[in-house]
Image (cartoon, helix red, strand yellow):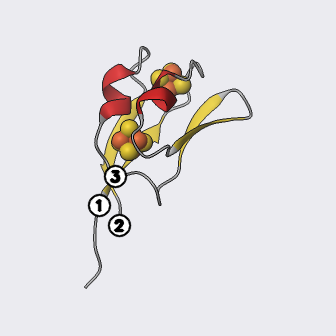
Amino acid sequence: MERKFKLCYVSDECVACGTCMKVCPKNAISINNGIKAKVDPDKCIGCGKCAKVCPASVMRIGERI
Ligand code: SF4
Ligand code: SF4
């Protein structure tokens, strides 16, 4: 049976402050080219911590197919 789990999406309004990166318990976030946070879906457990601390509120938790 295929497992479904949540992951985090980042919209283009990300200001690359790095706050989300510091709170992620799985080290799933990196700053892509210094302009936008990127989430590794294989590491993300969908805890939502990054979305809570993002000052620009650009992170969303979604369902992985
Ligand atoms: S939802 Fe949790 S595990 Fe996934 S990127 Fe955000 S802080 Fe990391
Ligand atoms: S906390 Fe928000 S604005 Fe800052 S790097 Fe992460 S997604 Fe981008």
Foreground: disc 3 or disc 2: 3
> Between disc 1 and disc 2, whose residue precedes?
1
Query: Of the residues tagged 3 and 1, which is closer to the observer?
Result: 3
**Residue 31's image quarter?**
top right
Position of residue 16 in the picture relative to residue 63 (left or right): right
The circle drawn on residue 65 is 2
N-terminal of the pair, mark 3 or mark 2, is 3
Q: What is the secondary structure assignment of the residue under circle 2? A: loop
**Distance from label 1 to label 2 (Cα)?**
8 Å
Report whether 16 appears left or right of 49: right
Q: Is residue 48 above or below residue 64?
A: above
Q: Are marks 3 and 1 in contact (CB under 8 Å)?
A: yes
User: At 32% across and 42% down in the image, what residue appears?
Assistant: 61
Q: Which residue is mark 3?
A: 45
The answer to whether the residue labelled 1 contacts the one labelled 2, judged by CB atoms less than 8 Å apart, is no
SS for callout 1:
loop
Q: Is mark 3 within 8 Å of ligand 1?
A: yes
Residue depicted at 43% across the width and 46% down the height: 26
Please determine whether, in this image, residue 32 is positioned above or below residue 35: below
Query: Which residue appears farthest toward the left when viewing the image?
Result: 1
- Residue type, mark 1 in image: Phe
Q: Disc 3 and disc 1: Cα gap in Å? A: 7 Å
For the residues labelled 3 and 2, the Cα–Cα distance comes to 14 Å
Residues 12 and 45: in front is 45
Q: Amino acid at mark 2?
A: Ile
Residue 33 shown left or right of residue 60 in the figure:
right
Label 1, on which residue? 5
